Amino acid sequence: MPDSAEKIKSLKTVRGKDLKIRYTQDDFEDALVNQRQYFDENGDILTPVTPLLLSRQVGTNNPTIDRLGNSEPRYILACFGSPVNSSGESAFKILIPYVPGDVNHNEHIKEILNYTSPSQFLEPKTPLSLSYHGENYNP
């Protein structure tokens, strides 16, 4: 049985960066939210970051857009098969920055559903399931 140090050496390193996203709340006010984008050890993208999500990206902490306060933003939890994980799956949280009713809201969900990962660590390369979570206000 390998010792702790050997186990640590064998683990795949996951890297990530935060994208700043302009998010439209259910009350139609815009807010700034971070979307974590994960990469595998080869630099291939794991998180289903799609063109419609990237179209809402802002370059820096935009002083004209406040950070999201006491709400949890709406998101999709996308589950992929991942043979390298002991559970056999990987789940990624993807912001849905478009308010329900906006034509891009449903189109963005379709982009996530049709996403194909370039990573060799996900099999199949497309999501096995999606779970939608609406905006949740925490007073």
Image (cartoon, rainbow, N blue to C red):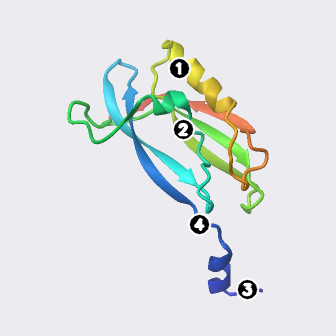
Query: Which residue is rendered at x = 60% and y = 49% of the image?
Result: 45
* Horizontal and vertical percent position of residue 37: 51, 48
- Looking at numbered disc 2 in the image, what kind of residue is underneath it? Ile
Describe residue 47's horizontal placement relative to residue 26 as left or right. Answer: right
Left or right: 37 as drawn, with respect to 120: left
**For discs 4 and 3, the disc positioned in front in the rendered view:** 4
- Residue at 58% x, 19% y is 106
In percent of width and height, residue 67 lies at 29, 37
**Please, what is the three-letter code of the amino acid marked with disc 1?**
His
Q: Which residue is mark 1?
A: 105
Q: Earlier in the sequence, mark 4 or mark 3?
A: 3
Spatial distance from mark 4 to mark 3, Cα to Cα?
Answer: 18 Å
Which callout, 2 or 1, points at the residue further toward the start of the chain? 2
Question: Which numbered disc flags the more N-terminal residue, 1 or 3?
Answer: 3
Residue contact between numbered discs 2 and 1, judged by CB atoms under 8 Å? no
Q: Which residue is mark 2?
A: 94
- Whole-angstrom CA distance, mark 1 to mark 3, is 48 Å
The quadrant where residue 26 appears: top left
Q: CA distance from mark 1 to mark 4?
A: 33 Å
Q: Secondary structure at mark 1?
A: helix
Near mark 4 (Cα within 10 A), the count class, few <14, some 14-19 or many ≥20, is few
Judge left or right: residue 117 versus residue 38: right
Badge 3 is on which residue?
A: 2
Question: Viewer-nearest of labels 1 and 4?
Answer: 4
Look at mark 4 in the image and give the residue it sits on: 13
Tell us which disc is closer to us: 4 or 2: 4
